[in-house]
Amino acid sequence: MRDDDPGECYEVHAVKYANMPRRRRDNFMSADDHDGPMPMDFFVWLLKSPKRTILVDTGFNAQTAERRQRQLLRCPIDALRLLGVDPDAIQDVVLTHLHYDHAGNIAKLPQARFHVGGHTRGLQAVRVFTQRGWVVLASDASHYYENMAEARPFPIVFNVADMLEGYRRLHAAADSAQHVVPGHDPDVLRRYPRLASDPIGTAMLHLAPTE
């Protein structure tokens, strides 16, 4: 249900912590006539208001990265310190779903209460009010901008019709198409202002896109 009472206003940061090479053919169900590199980034998201700090997803660790052949750039939980957040003090964590890249590192958040929507079929997106309006963090409801813009679903899917309907619901919950943020697209770091003190990459989603 959509609730238009904004309540608190949050800063929203997309913190990149890992990546992996992929090709365009890996990211769409339909054939791609222009196949080429289309890498995947991995993020966690930090929501900050004057009264509350919420972490959305928790990433994976070095052991998982080695096992799954992902390039781990840093621990996503330790990276929160760049934003002035002590992981030991985080009290609320939203897990959008329980895949390895969204729900690891639990032991690094000893004070947190975890808010969980099930596994892939029960995927959660997060709607958050910012200084530029309602932003929607799609997480794996849309891996890339192009999945939504071209109505071309990601190939790991339980029900294609439900995924396409999910794209519509994401946009209905946001103030515009520019307010919907996909879960794994490197373009996020190109479209939004970046935190100057972070060489790996943190996008400030509460600020207007620059592209």
Image (tube, helix red, strand yellow):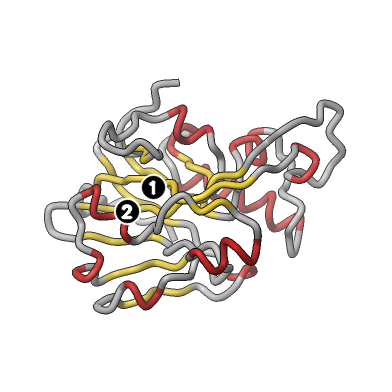
Q: SS at mark 2?
A: helix
The residue where tag 2 is placed is 79
Q: Residues within 10 Å of mark 2 (few under 14, many from 20)?
A: many
- When asked about the image quadrant of residue 35, the answer is top right
- Say which amino acid is labelled 2: Ala
> Percent position (x, y) of residue 119?
59, 73
> Percent position (x, y) of residue 121?
64, 69
Q: CA distance from mark 2 to mark 1?
A: 8 Å
At horizontal 28% and vertical 75% (from top left) the residue drawn is 112
Q: Is residue 196 rendered to the left or right of residue 115?
A: left
Residue 15's tag is 1
Quadrant (top left, top right, bottom left, bottom right) of the N terminus: bottom left
Tags 2 and 1 in contact by the CB under 8 Å rule? yes
- When asked about the image quadrant of residue 100, the answer is bottom right
Q: Is residue 88 rendered to the left or right of residue 162?
A: left
Q: Residues within 10 Å of mark 1 (few under 14, many from 20)?
A: many
Q: Which residue appears farthest toward the left when viewing the image?
A: 50
Front in this rendered view, residue 176 or 54: 54
Quadrant (top left, top right, bottom left, bottom right) of the C terminus: top left
Front in this rendered view, residue 113 or 37: 37
| In the image, residue 154 above or below residue 150 | below
